[in-house]
Structure formats: structure tokens, C-alpha cells
Image (cartoon, coloured by chain):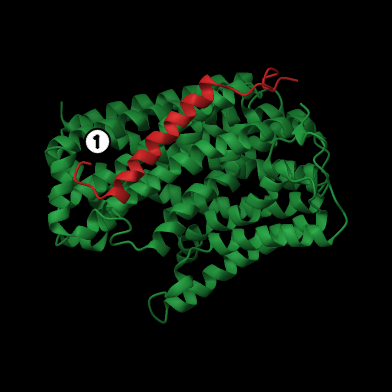
């Protein structure tokens, strides 16, 4: 992609994939996080 | 309007805003806890962007361009792992437990947390000494980066650059404490993000698009587009690990997890910080693409590759983009300096003077002392940066590695492992510290005899953290003075908060 070798291109994929996982983490929080850390 | 005038107006407005934040936040600073970590009520946007702006200093932007120029596109991996390991995973793995445990233990600094978690006053003295000493050294390198930026982009004398930018940071940190650090960091994070976006956009226009730039690079040297290409795996892996995993043991970054509001803010913050951290792709990419426009035969670039982005900006980009880029670089340096300054002051006043030597000072006096200490630490850093002695410059490369080698494993195990012993923690802290320093001194000796070979090419952070890890596990298993996680539900292996 963009003339880059695969291993170099994967660095951009890695960055974008991390952001995608972060979005999923926000959208689907774990079950036992109801307290939200407040004591 | 001519360019210097645009610079001066934009800079003056920006500096006035920073100082105003310092004085406004001073009103909200009523207790020492407020001064050192805010009121534990900071939202996801401010926490996340101030995390990113503390993470990336001007050295990353300018030096990152230099790396990209020298080694090519393989350096994009630095940015990728910064986002994955230095940002997202740091928030996921450390965030919630740090918030829960520091609240439970009423700990507001890293030495304070380690001392309370392990019931080990030695940890407070040792780690606060390491932080106070090596973060001041780190301060000097950040200020040097700021002085150089003023010098190259604005033709102002280096000493004035250090003086002006340093003094403004010292003023707002002294008066506003941690709240001023995170709020200015938030604004500086936005400025950095916008300026990196503009720099990328304009550079791609100049190079005729990404594909055309990459093809031109490939035509010059295939190694410039391959991974690891011209860099080689040992150098690449160790550098990437230092600047990504190192974050997990750096007190100025961990502080964001003590002060954030709640778990929901941590989840949202992880996303915002990961998107913000992705701006690190820009300097490496632009630095590499600069190679197609600025040949390596240029004598200035042969001597100092760090000039790649400033020279590209001056030669090809419109004045307004140069001005914004310049403000972005200044913002990056100042936000890191302020984040580090408040932590060094906290380590000195709260951990060393008050808690370790049991000085009896009340809350109001402690805030006053913290302000005086921020001022003194800031002024010492500025004085050292005016003419950085050779030793300081050598120590700078060590500072991240040494602090992270001493702090990372004890901190991480403090959050997750119930089987740690006091002896194990002491062995891990001191061992990691000594091995990383010893390794880097050995590298200096070997370097004087010729280029480093084999495993000696790996950065001192890696043997330091490995030694710290092995010592923690082995010594904890073989000794009996166990200190369990105070709020741990033993059956479910979960924190009760």
C-alpha cells in the first residue's frame, strides 16, 4: 500500500487497529464496571 | 504582516493564556493533594491530552524528524508502538488499578504509593532520590530542546529561548501546581495535534502525495522504505521499547491515573489518548519524506539530522504553517517540562523532606514549600540548561532508562502480584537501577574502542527492566516477608473498590 513494503505498512495498520480496539473498549465496557471506580 | 511579527503575536497570546491558567487554577488548589495531583476529579479529555503532551516533548518532534530522515519509514514503528504500548495498553493495564489503589492507600506520588503499598519507607527515599536527580537531568534536556527550537526557527539566542520558555513554565507550575500542568497540557496537546496535522498535510502536498513520496524514497535507497531497513533490529527494538514501555515506569505519566475521575473516564481517556498519540506518526513520516527534498549531501544535515523538519518547513511550507509548527514544538517542550517539574518538586518536598525525614509541616505550609520547591527545581534546571555540562548531556540519555528500570517492575507488580515480598521489592528496585546504569556505562567504555557489537547494541533499559523483573520474582519466591495488595479479594483475584 502506498508503495510501502508489507512490514512497514503494518506499522500504520497497527496504529489504526489500536484505535479501533480502543473504540470497542469504550463501546462495550466489562460487566462488573458498574461502580465506575467511585467509592 | 511579516513573519517574526506573526510569531511574536501568536507566542505572546499563547504565553499569556498559560500564565492565566496558572493563576486561575491556583484558586482551586486548597490542599497538598490538589497541588500534586489535582482533586482526583479530572475528566477524560484533559487527562488524556495532558498525558500525550507530557509524553511527547519537542525532542520527539524534532528528533523524530531526524530519525525519519536518517533511517526512513521503518521509524513509523516507533509511532505505532507508542500508540499501542505507550498509550492504549498503559491505560488499560495500569489505569483502573492505579486509580483504585492510590485512592485506597491515599497515595499521591509514585514514591508515596510504593512506600505504602509495600509498607517500605526505604522505597520512598530511594525512588524519590532517583526521581529528583534523574528528572532534573531530563528537564535540562527538554529545556535544551526548547532553546534550540527558538534558536533555529526564530533566530533568537539559545539562552533567551531557554530563559523565556523555562520561566513561563516555572511561573504557572509554581502558582497553579498540578491543575495548571494538566490544563495547560490539555491546551498544548490540542496545539500539537493541530500543528502536526497541518505539517503532514502541507508536506504531502509538497512531495506530491504519500505514494509519490514513498516511490521517490525507494528509488533513492530501498533501505529507506523497508523494515528494519537501514536501522537494524537491535537498535530499532530497543529504542521502540524504551520510548513505549518506558512510559509504564515514568512518574509524570503515571500521575494522570491517580488524578482521573473514575473508571469510565479511564476508558474514554484511553481512546482519546490513543488518537492523540497517533500524531507521532507525523514527525517520522515527514522526516523520511524530507529526504526526497533535502539531499543528505547538505552539510548542515550531515552534521545534524534533527534539522530535517525545520529546514523542510523553512524551505517549502507557507509562513502560517511554519508559525503553527513552531508553536506546536514549543507546546510539546513546555508541557513535558511542566509535567516533569511538578513531579520533581513533589518527590523533593513531599516524599523526601516531609515524609522521609518526618518534618512536621501543616498542609498550608506544605503547599507553600511545594511552590518554593517547584521554583527552585525549575531555576536549577534552567541554570544547568544555559550551558549544559557534558555529564548532564550524557546522563540525559540515561534518565528515562534509569527511572523506568527502578520504578516499572515494582509499580506493575504492586498493582497485580499478591506474592511480592519487601526483600523482593528492594532487590528489584536497586537491581534494576544498578544494572541499567552499569550497562550504559559499559556501553560508553566499549564505544570508545569502536562501534557496539551484538547484545551491547541494546539500550540499558532492556537489561535494567529484565534484571528488575527476575530479581522481583526470584527473591519474592525465596523470601517470606510478603506484603499483599491491601484491597485484594483473594478468591476472585479482583480489587475491592
The percent position of residue B452, horizontal first and vertical second, equals 42, 74
Q: Find disc 1 in the rendering and name its residue.
A: B200
The percent position of residue B240, horizontal first and vertical second, equals 44, 53
Residue B484 vs residue A31: left or right? right
Q: Residue at 54% of width from left, 42% of height from top?
A: B340
Q: Residue at 40% of width from left, 43% of height from top?
A: B80
Residue B466 falls in image quadrant: bottom right
Between B219 and B390, the one nearer to me in the picture: B219
Residue A20 falls in image quadrant: top left
The percent position of residue B471, horizontal first and vertical second, equals 71, 62
**Pointer 1 indicates a residue of which chain?**
B
Residue B254 falls in image quadrant: top right
Image quadrant holding the N terminus of chain B, namely top left
Mark 1 Cα-neighbour bin, 10 Å: few <14, some 14–19, many ≥20: some
Residue B214 vs residue B395: left or right? left
Tally of numbered discs: 1
> Which residue is at the far right?
B480
Between B137 and B227, the one nearer to me in the picture: B227
Between B65 and B163, the one nearer to me in the picture: B65
Query: Disc 1 on helix, strand or loop?
Result: helix
Q: Residue at 45% of width from left, 61% of height from top?
A: B393
Colour in which chain B is drawn: green
Between B395 and B5, the one nearer to me in the picture: B395
> Which residue is at the far bottom?
B449
The percent position of residue A25, horizontal first and vertical second, equals 53, 26
Q: Residue at 58% of width from left, 45% of height from top?
A: B248
Q: Is residue B146 above or below residue B228?
A: above
Image quadrant holding the C terminus of chain B, namely top right
Q: Is residue B470 above or below residue B1?
A: below
Q: Is residue B237 visible?
A: yes
Colour in which chain A is drawn: red
Q: Is residue B150 visible?
A: no
Amino acid at each position: 500500500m502506498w508503495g510501502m513494503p508489507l512490514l512497514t505498512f503494518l506499522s500504520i495498520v497497527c496504529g489504526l487497529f489500536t484505535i479501533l480496539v480502543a473504540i470497542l473498549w469504550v463501546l462495550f465496557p466489562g460487566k462488573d464496571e458498574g461502580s465506575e471506580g467511585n467509592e | 504582516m511579516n513573519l517574526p511579527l506573526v510569531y511574536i503575536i501568536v507566542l505572546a497570546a499563547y504565553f499569556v493564556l498559560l500564565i492565566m491558567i496558572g493563576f486561575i487554577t491556583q484558586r482551586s488548589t486548597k490542599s497538598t493533594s490538589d497541588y500534586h495531583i489535582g482533586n482526583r476529579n479530572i475528566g477524560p479529555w484533559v487527562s488524556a491530552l495532558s498525558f500525550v503532551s507530557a509524553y511527547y516533548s519537542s525532542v520527539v518532534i524534532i528528533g523524530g524528524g531526524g530519525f525519519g530522515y536518517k533511517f526512513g519509514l521503518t521509524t513509523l514503528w516507533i509511532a505505532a508502538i507508542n500508540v499501542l504500548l505507550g498509550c492504549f495498553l498503559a491505560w488499560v493495564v495500569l489505569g483502573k488499578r492505579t486509580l483504585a489503589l492510590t485512592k485506597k492507600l491515599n497515595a499521591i506520588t509514585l514514591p508515596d504509593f510504593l512506600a505504602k503499598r509495600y509498607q517500605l519507607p526505604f522505597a520512598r527515599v530511594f525512588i524519590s532520590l532517583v526521581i529528583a536527580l534523574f528528572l532534573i537531568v531530563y528537564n535540562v534536556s527538554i529545556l535544551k530542546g526548547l532553546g534550540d527550537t527558538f534558536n533555529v526557527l526564530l533566530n533568537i539566542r539559545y539562552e533567551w529561548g531557554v530563559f523565556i520558555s523555562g520561566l513561563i513554565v516555572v511561573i504557572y507550575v509554581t502558582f497553579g501546581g498540578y491543575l495548571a500542568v494538566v490544563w495547560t497540557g490539555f491546551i498544548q496537546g490540542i496545539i500539537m495535534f493541530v500543528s502536526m496535522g497541518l505539517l503532514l498535510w502541507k508536506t504531502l502536498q509538497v512531495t506530491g502525495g504519500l505514494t509519490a513520496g514513498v516511490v521517490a524514497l525507494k528509488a533513492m535507497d530501498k533501505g529507506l522504505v523497508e523494515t528494519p531497513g537501514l536501522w537494524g533490529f537491535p537498535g530499532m527494538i530497543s529504542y521502540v521499547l524504551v520510548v513505549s514501555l518506558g512510559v509504564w515506569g515514568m512518574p509524570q505519566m503515571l500521575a494522570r491515573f491517580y488524578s482521573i475521575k473514575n473508571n469510565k473516564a479511564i476508558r474514554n481517556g484511553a481512546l482519546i489518548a490513543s488518537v492523540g498519540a497517533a500524531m507521532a506518526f507525523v514527525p517520522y513520516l515527514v522526516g523520511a519524506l524530507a529526504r526526497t527534498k533535502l539531499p543528505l549531501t547538505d552539510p548542515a544535515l550531515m552534521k545534524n539530522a534533527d534539522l530535517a523538519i525545520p529546514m523542510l518547513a523553512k524551505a517549502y511550507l507557507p509562513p502560517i504553517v511554519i508559525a503553527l509548527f513552531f508553536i506546536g514544538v514549543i507546546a510539546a517542550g513546555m508541557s513535558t517540562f511542566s509535567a516533569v517539574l511538578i513531579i520533581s518538586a513533589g518527590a523533593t518536598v513531599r516524599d523526601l523532606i516531609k515524609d522521609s525525614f518526618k518534618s512536621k509541616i501543616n498542609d498550608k505550609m506544605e503547599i507553600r514549600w511545594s511552590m518554593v520547591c517547584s521554583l527552585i527545581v525549575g531555576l536549577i534546571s534552567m541554570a544547568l540548561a544555559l550551558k549544559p555540562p557534558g555529564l548532564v548531556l550524557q546522563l540525559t540519555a540515561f534518565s528515562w532508562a534509569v527511572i523506568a528500570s527502578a520504578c516499572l517492575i515494582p509499580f506493575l507488580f504492586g498493582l497485580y502480584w499478591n506474592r511480592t515480598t519487601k526483600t523482593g521489592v528492594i532487590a528489584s528496585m536497586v537491581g534494576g537501577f544498578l544494572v541499567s546504569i552499569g550497562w550504559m556505562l559499559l556501553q560508553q567504555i566499549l564505544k570508545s574502542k569502536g562501534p557496539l557489537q551484538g547484545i551491547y547494541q541494546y539500550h540499558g533499559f532492556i537489561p535494567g527492566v529484565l534484571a528488575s523483573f527476575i530479581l522481583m520474582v526470584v527473591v519474592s519466591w525465596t523470601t517470606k516477608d510478603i506484603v499483599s495488595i491491601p484491597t485484594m479479594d483473594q478468591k476472585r483475584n479482583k480489587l475491592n473498590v
